Amino acid sequence: MNPTSTQAAESGVAMIAKSAPPVSVSIATIVGMPVSDLVLWGTLLYTMLMIGHKMLAIYRDIKQGGRDERNHQDVA
């Protein structure tokens, strides 16, 4: 795959990602779901994902036993 087609694929994915929120709001409005409900559910989903991500990071840190490089302090 040459650089031009890679850039085109990346820009296509970015374009789809950027258009997803407005498209989903439009579809939800047509179906009859109020935008406020969509925002409420989106916020709930985002919050749950962030809590899960943080819990996973804490679990991994505990599992490593605090042997992470950022926990070591160099005494020089």
Image: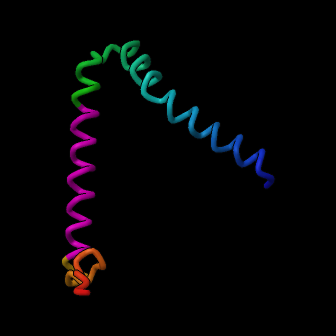
Residue 35 pos. (x, y %): 29, 18
Q: Residue furthest bottom?
A: 76
From what the image shows, is residue 15 above or below residue 22?
Answer: below
Question: Toward the viewer: 32 or 55?
Answer: 55
Which quadrant of the structure image shows residue 65? Answer: bottom left
Which quadrant of the structure image shows residue 39? Answer: top left
Q: For the N terminus, which image quadrant?
A: bottom right
From what the image shows, is residue 72 above or below residue 31?
Answer: below
Horizontal side of residue 32 vs 61, given as left or right:
right
Q: Main secondary structure of the magenta part?
A: helix
Q: Which residues are magenta?
A: 41-61
Q: Is residue 72 magenta?
A: no
The mark tally for this picture is 0
Residue 72 pos. (x, y %): 24, 82
Q: Is residue 43 magenta?
A: yes
From what the image shows, is residue 54 above or below residue 41?
Answer: below
Q: Residue furthest front?
A: 76
